Image: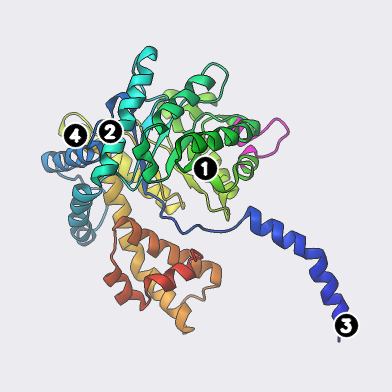
Amino acid sequence: MLDDAVYTELDRRLAPVDAARQAAWPGERPRRQPVHTCYVPADAVVPGVAAAWGTAALAALDEHGLPDLGYPAALLDEVLPRVRAKLAAEPVEDLRVDAEDGYRGRPEAEDDDVRRAAAAVAADLAAGTAPPSVGIRAKSLEGPTRRRGVRSLDLFLADPALRAQAAVVTLPKVTDVEQVRAFLPVLDALEAAHGVALVLELQVETPQAVLGADGAVTLARMVHAAGPRLTGLHFGTYDYSASLGIAAAHQASDHPAADLAKQLMQVAVAGTGAHAVDGSTNLLPVGPREQVHAGWRVHAGLVRRALERGLYQGWDLHPAQLVTRYVATYAFFRGALPAAAARLAAYVERTDGGVLDEPATARALAAVVLRGLDCGAVDDGEVGAATGLDRVTLDVLAGRG
């Protein structure tokens, strides 16, 4: 019995709120999120670096065999052939040329090393062998490294062949929202100078990036200051842990302190289209077989743990880590498919089942299936047979439209 004027006034008052919310939290973007980022020092990037990582990973798997990682034998029988195919065809989904902490060259050699790395990436792009996503991590915007970092970006992006696809710029050790705001015009200038499209990642490696002096969560302010350029917040396991005074022996991405930071990262990016990204482990699978197996068990456990917590991307620092990156990732998505498919089919068909799912849950179920498709853990035929849905419908259900 309400007069129409009540509805009109309600719409009038809330229309600006609706517009602001849509601008700040536009939802999931249609682009594929890589399952990992592989950091390669600038002085070690050569043409064919991604393929070389895949070859090295396959060699490690052939030499040492896979240890018991706690997966059912039947699931591993499905996963391992796919992992081998992935390592042969697309071993690296996201390559980051590292001119920051991983770079071990002499300061006076950085210009030449960055140029050579750019030329190597450009050659792979021209040959069609580059990873789907490529970029560079330069030094931070702190006073002592600010100009050096921007100069390396300028030199790297100067190669004309890099205009073929968007490049990712990773900004490390961010401590203040103003650094993000000040960096955006630099990215604009780099785009104008070199004709390349740039997207931005922020590395969360300091307590100041998580909690500001005013008690506010700095992460959220950084995300919204960066705006649509931002694709992710990347957690820096060891810098962050060390800055909290955690002893080196206990610095790990599954430490409770790391979990707190990553949970806040997830909340900060939720609904914005950017992603929270897990950190790395420095326990590398190298050496004799028992050491390789120990490294694989740790890495596989951390990847599995991250996936279960909704962190679908992490760092890999060594080619042999690709083995357990894909084993754990493929096992996760293949293991999730039957239940997700049944619930999606029931949701779309509005049939009664053991679980009553809502639109938000259907969105999450579809997103998990799509992530499995994106990385190669499952294929279209399997998904279509299990769900009765095509890729377009899944995109709509997942909010990727």
Secondary structure found at label 3: loop
Q: Position of residue 312 (x, y in %)?
A: 42, 50
Q: Position of residue 159 (x, y in %)?
A: 36, 33
The amino acid pointed to by label 2 is: Ala
Q: Which residue is depicted at the point 49% across and 40% down? A: 201
Q: Which residue is the extreme one toward the left?
A: 63
**Marks 3 and 4, the one that precedes in the sequence:** 3
Q: Which residue is the extreme one toward the bottom?
A: 1
The amino acid pointed to by label 3 is: Asp
**Marks 1 and 3, the one that precedes in the sequence:** 3
**Marks 2 and 3, the one that precedes in the sequence:** 3
**Marks 2 and 1, the one that precedes in the sequence:** 2
Q: Position of residue 253 (x, y in %)?
A: 43, 37
Do the residues bearing badges 3 and 4 touch, measured as CB atoms within 8 Å? no
Residue 262 is marked as 1
In 3D space, how far apart are the residues under numbered discs 1 and 4 (Cα atoms)?
31 Å
Closest to the camera, between mark 1 and mark 4, is 1
Q: Residues within 10 Å of mark 3 (few under 14, many from 20)?
A: few
Does the magenta run of residues contain 272?
no
Residue 3 is marked as 3
Q: Considering only vertical position in the picture, is 23 above or below 232?
A: below
Which residue is under mark 2?
Answer: 120
The amino acid pointed to by label 1 is: Lys
What's drawn in magenta, residue-wise?
A: 208-219
The amino acid pointed to by label 4 is: Glu
Q: Residues within 10 Å of mark 1 (few under 14, many from 20)?
A: many
Secondary structure found at label 1: helix
